[in-house]
Image (cartoon, helix red, strand yellow):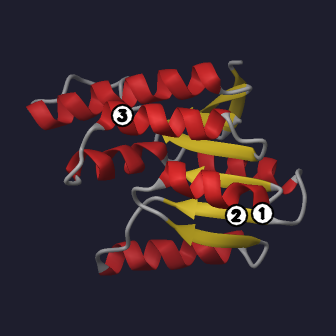
Amino acid sequence: MILVGGGSRGGKTAYALERARRFGPRLAYVATAEALDEEMCARATAHRNERGQQFTTIEEPLALPALIEQRAVGFDAMVIDCLTVWLSNVMLSEAHDTEEATRRLVEAASGNGSTLIFVTNEVGAGIVPDNELARRFRDQAGWLNQQMAAAADEVYLMAFGCPLKVK
């Protein structure tokens, strides 16, 4: 398992895709974002075009643990982009038990023999948010990232498009 984190537009996804291509031709890209408006649809199309035909795109906003358990073995590498969007989906869902969802994700990813490359955002380096939901999201994202980093074999922090190996 590889974890790639950093700030917005820091090169996380590009690096994750580059790493995935090294593992073989059977590649998957798991999108956790939902294209619910015109701008997100355009972004999704642009990103799909950038990846090219090499990656099978799978859209899964919530059930990442089950997806990993069921489908990861069919690919040489799977890029999951991104954990913080997945976390916000969980927080806003009916279940919204982020601690249980995180535990299940870490368990599914750790017990899997496939190459999984997770992309995540570092959201705790800015100011303290002014509302309870945003503060809770920031805290949950920090805990999620810590648990994923502890379970990962490799961890990279992207800064200005440059990968810094942390673990």
* Disc 1 packing (10 Å; few <14; some 14–19; many ≥20): few
Q: Nearer the viewer, residue 131 or 3?
A: 3
Give the residue number, with chain letter if any, for mark 2. Answer: 28
Is 71 in front, or is 89? 71
For this view, does 120 lie left or right of residue 96? Answer: right
| Residue 18 shown left or right of residue 155 in the figure | right
Residue at image coords 70%, 48%: 16
> In the rendered view, does 35 fall on the left or right side of 5?
left
Please give the name of the residue rendered at 57% of the width and 44% of the height, measured from the top-left corner. Answer: 119
Q: Do the CB atoms of the residues marked 1 and 2 lie less than 8 Å apart?
A: yes
At numbered mark 1, what does the secondary structure look like: helix, strand or loop? helix
- In the orientation shown, which residue stands out farthest toward the left? 131
How dense is the environment of label 3, judged by Cα within 10 Å: few (below 14), some, or many (20 and up)? few
Task: Give the quadrant of residue 124.
Answer: top left
Quadrant location of the C terminus in the rendered image: top right
| Residue 128 spot, x, y in % from top left | 20, 23
Residue 85: horizontal and vertical position, in percent?
A: 39, 50
Task: Determine which residue is flagged by label 1.
Answer: 74
Query: At label 1, which amino acid type do we have?
Result: Gly
- Does residue 3 show up? no
Task: Examine the rendering and report whether any part of residue 93 can be seen.
Answer: yes
Image point (47%, 63%), residue name: 60
- Which of labels 3 and 2 is toward the front? 3
The one nearer the camera, 112 or 164, is: 112
**Which three-letter amino acid code belongs to the residue tagged 2?**
Ala
User: What separation in Å lies between label 3 and label 2 (alpha carbons)?
Assistant: 25 Å
Q: In whole angstroms, how far apart are the C-alphas of marks 1 and 2?
A: 9 Å
Give the residue at mark 3.
100
- The local secondary structure at tag 2 comes to strand
Which quadrant: the N terminus? top right
Q: Secondary structure at mark 3?
A: helix
